[in-house]
Image (spheres, grey):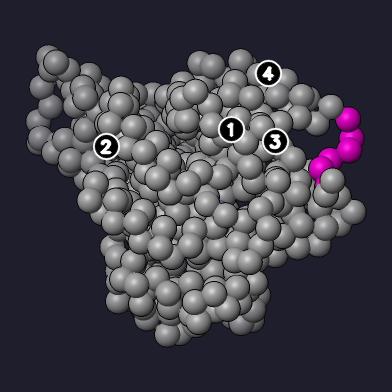
Amino acid sequence: MKNTLYKPELLYSNGGFIANGGVLVSENGQILEAPRKIDPSSTKIVDLPGKALLPGFVNVHSHSFQRLIRGKSESRVISGKDFWSWRWTMYHAASQLEPQDVYDVARMVFFEMVLAGTTTVGEFHYLHNAPNGQPYDDPNLLSKQVIAAAQSVGIRIVLLRTAYLRSGYELPSDPGQIRFFESTSAFLENMSALVHNSSAPSSEVRFGVAPHSVRAVPLADLKKIAAWSREYKLPVHMHVAEQVAENTACLREYGATPVQLLSRERLLGPDFTAVHAIHISTDEIAMLAEANATICSCPTTERNLGDGIMAADHVMAAGISVAFGSDSQVQIDPLEDARELDYHLRLRQQERAILDQIAAQTLASRLFDCATVHGARALDLPSGGLTPGSFADFFTVDLNDVSIAGHSAEDLLPIIVFALNRSAIRDVVVNGRFILRDKKHALQEEIISRYQETHRKVWPNTRTGGPS
Ligand SMILES: [Zn+2]
């Protein structure tokens, strides 16, 4: 059994970089304590001159099929003016997809994530049924297609299988959502079958539970699902307070906002990730902090949808861990999400570097942690860093790339966080295996051409969705 020592020119370490460092990786893909002396007979050396090596990004919140609506919803005529009408376009794409298409779209998205330095994806998966709304013979068929896509690309996946039980409080059932609906009992049965019958290695494929939102999952069902998740010790992810209308409906139904309801019912905890958490009060921030929950922010999607701005300054000051997700895939670049978290606050407050020095941490280091270690925490994975015992998930950047060339060891991280162009990412390693080597993925031509075929099928002409 040979270990591998990766020797970059600069190695990420504690929010900065060191020269002459290395990462020692076991054959089963785990980072090992590097000994002072390397035995060449038992260690393969991989030299990475001109490159810096950093821990891979963890994308906590993805809906892979939504990649198909990129560029299709940037018109008021086609997709209306708000989040609720934007969903028409999304439902149109969702209604078209056969199992093979689900696989092909997911592969494209995961490949793009890898190009952006992402080594783990949390896929919030709610496309379950056949186009006619009936379950497939195997109700987990589409979950398995997404998992197979991740394995084909080589990215690590946490499949957050989603419970979607109704359109909303006092709302008639929306025909655009028939592929999402399951009963609570069917959801738990399917979830259980998926977790117990998975043949994939548990280091590469894991599971979590995702009640879609308080809009789509009534409280009584939410309690059952949360109890099941906790019995199996799986992370729980949920859309929370993305839209004001969601809070208003929750107030009408329960006399409480989503966070108040979740707190009151003791559904929050360290295993809970609130996705978005934009429209929340100071009291609600305190509730999430008290429960030690994570917030997953999706700034590139949130600004595209006009959702609002998450109060990251107050959230972080309260000690809440913030992670990132690419959500609708309007852009796939975790560093763009990182920048926007601070930039949106700058525009609102007309000040700079708002999130700097919270708990004495520098801004770049804090944002980088959100994209790595906080994401790993949300998905309950030993990754996000380069410490012994972690999964060997990392990427390299070309130090001569025009977007980051000219740096000192002290300012390289802020340069990367605020200016790295995705094209500077050269290699990506997941579980100790190169899945991108010098910007090349073994399957990239096939992945792209298959995706283009699916895209042509879903959008055969220029007309794009809308209410019917
Ligand atoms: Zn989402």
| Percent x, y of residue 291 | 30, 71
Measured Cα–Cα span from mark 2 to mark 3: 37 Å
Give the Cα distance between marks 2 and 1: 39 Å
Is residue 299 left or right of 91 when viewed as pictured?
left
Spatial CA span between label 2 and label 4: 31 Å
Task: Say which amino acid is labelled 1.
Answer: Gln
Q: Which callout, 2 or 3, points at the residue further toward the start of the chain?
A: 3
Q: Which mark is residue 391?
A: 2
Q: Disc 3 residue type?
A: Ser
Q: Is mark 1 within 8 Å of ligand 1?
A: no
User: Alpha-carbon distance for marks 3 and 4?
Assistant: 21 Å
Callout 4 amino acid: Ser
- Residue 412 is a magenta residue: no
SS at mark 4 in the image: helix
Q: Is residue 432 above or below residue 180?
A: above
- In front: label 1 or label 4: 1
The image quarter containing residue 121 is top left
Mark 1 neighbour class, 10 Å CA radius: few under 14, some 14 to 19, many 20 or more:
some
**CB atoms at circles 3 and 4 under 8 Å apart?**
no
Along the viewing direction, whichever of 55 and 448 lies nearer the viewer = 448
Give the label on residue 449, or none: 4
Magenta stretch bounds: 461-466
Residue annotated with mark 3: 95
Residues tagged 2 and 3 counted as in contact (Cβ below 8 A): no
Circle on res. 134: 1
